[in-house]
């Protein structure tokens, strides 16, 4: 399979060119994890793939607990469905935490102090209480523990990776934290209950991870999965093998490298959506998940350089045609685009339509500036 065919199939798999999913939560479940350190951009990624009309509507689902925002899979924020949180943490967090502890020890060198910080969080959030990062940081400081800046962020990440806390409803513009025990249904929705014929919860979890990743991201490679979920190469291969044993995966070769997808979850593109241009946020799953086999670019398409890394990709006909970034004002959304000089007038109109859709998702008029 050539690169263009791979990219086109991924666009359909992720419901970008196929029929959209019903809700933002359904999109999170399809993708299993959605990188979300830029929260509003990540919500707009869910809007792109669903019938949810706006970022505000997607946020309502987040606040209602259909999915949560937390540190999982890698050392960064992700959206993850509530029912998938525990088993993903159990499977992937040990390696992520081992990497994160190198940073934590710079600020909290004594293990007993980290334990004390986690105990304080547990007590402060007991009974369904919610707190912001600033509030939890202030609590840390009153007990002589690091409570500001980068230090408290790393401590909070450990609490998330250990399944103590996760993101709760948004308060104004601020992210809140609550106890996983309070925010997530207490029933452990764990793979490996015996019904799938797999022995051992870790084997079953790896198989489920492989099945779910390739169902939402395929065609993708085992190396893509390993990077995405912080797995060893051995575990990534085991995840592929486990998913194949369930009859869930089909293999295609891309430049001699096996790539996998789920025929059961394959989606057919629809003509109306094939005509769309896409303004993908920097951390969108369609862009970030595939460091090796990704969108081909027009030869004269502008590229991101240095401090301009906040510019996302503008994609048209499964090809990167330029860059974009947005600024949200009280009365409008300004979207700047840098497009390939070779783009024709009709192609530019399609990009302009994507600008209008992005502004509509923000509930504001669009101001499009080509730079």
Image: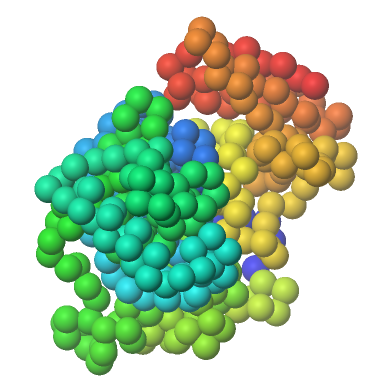
Image quarter (top left, top right, bottom left or bottom right) of the N terminus = bottom right
At 45% across and 86% down in the image, what residue appears?
238
Res. 273 visible in picture: no
Along the line of sight, the residue nearer the viewer: 154 or 264: 154
Which image quadrant is residue 211 in? bottom left
Query: Does 302 sit left or right of 167 as displayed?
Result: right
Image quarter (top left, top right, bottom left or bottom right) of the C terminus = top right
Along the line of sight, the residue nearer the viewer: 115 or 294: 115
Q: Residue 58: where, in percent of width, then height? A: 34, 34
Q: Residue 223: where, in percent of width, then height? A: 59, 75
At 46% across and 21% down in the image, what residue appears?
362
- Above or below, 280 against 83 in this view is above
Query: Does 118 sit left or right of 145 as displayed?
Result: left
Q: Residue 314: where, in percent of width, then height? A: 67, 36
Q: Residue 315: where, in percent of width, then height? A: 66, 40
- Above or below, 28 against 278 in this view is below
- Above or below, 24 against 14 in this view is above
Res. 319 visible in picture: yes
Q: How many labels sit on residues?
A: 0
Along the line of sight, the residue nearer the viewer: 157 or 294: 157
Which image quadrant is residue 137 in? top left
At 23% across and 56% down in the image, what residue appears?
122
């Amino acid at each position: 399979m050539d690169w263009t065919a791979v990219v086109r199939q991924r666009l359909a798999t992720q419901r970008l060119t196929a029929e959209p999913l019903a809700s933002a939560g359904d999109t999170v479940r399809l993708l299993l994890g959605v990188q979300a350190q830029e929260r509003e951009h990540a919500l707009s990624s869910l809007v792109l793939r669903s019938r949810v009309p706006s970022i505000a509507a997607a946020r309502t689902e987040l606040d209602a607990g259909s999915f949560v925002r937390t540190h999982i899979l890698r050392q960064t924020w992700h959206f993850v469905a509530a029912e998938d949180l525990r088993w993903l943490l159990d499977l992937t967090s040990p390696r992520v935490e081992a990497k994160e502890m190198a940073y934590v020890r710079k600020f909290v060198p004594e293990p007993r102090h980290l334990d004390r910080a986690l105990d304080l969080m547990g007590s402060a959030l007991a009974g369904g209480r919610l707190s912001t990062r600033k509030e939890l940081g202030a609590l840390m400081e009153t007990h002589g523990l690091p409570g500001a800046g980068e230090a408290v962020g790393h401590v909070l990440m450990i609490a998330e990776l250990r399944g103590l806390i996760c993101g709760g409803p948004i308060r104004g513009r601020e992210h809140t934290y609550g106890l996983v025990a309070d925010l997530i249904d207490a029933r452990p929705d764990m793979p490996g209950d015996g019904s799938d014929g797999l022995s051992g919860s870790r084997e079953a979890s790896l198989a489920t991870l492989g099945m779910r990743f390739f169902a939402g991201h395929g065609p993708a490679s085992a190396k893509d999965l390993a990077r995405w979920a912080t797995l060893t190469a051995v575990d990534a291969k085991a995840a592929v093998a486990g998913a194949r044993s369930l009859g869930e995966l089909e293999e295609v070769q891309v430049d001699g490298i096996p790539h996998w997808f789920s025929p059961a979850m394959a989606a057919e593109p629809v003509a109306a959506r094939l005509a769309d241009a896409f303004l993908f946020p920097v951390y969108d799953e369609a862009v970030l998940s595939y460091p090796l086999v990704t969108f081909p670019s027009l030869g004269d398409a502008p590229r991101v350089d240095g401090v301009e890394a906040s510019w996302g990709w503008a994609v048209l006909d499964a090809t990167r045609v330029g860059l974009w970034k947005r600024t949200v004002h009280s009365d409008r959304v300004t979207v700047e685009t840098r497009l390939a000089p070779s783009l024709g007038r009709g192609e530019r109109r399609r990009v302009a339509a994507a600008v209008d859709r992005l502004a509509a998702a923000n509930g504001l008029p669009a101001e499009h500036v080509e730079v």
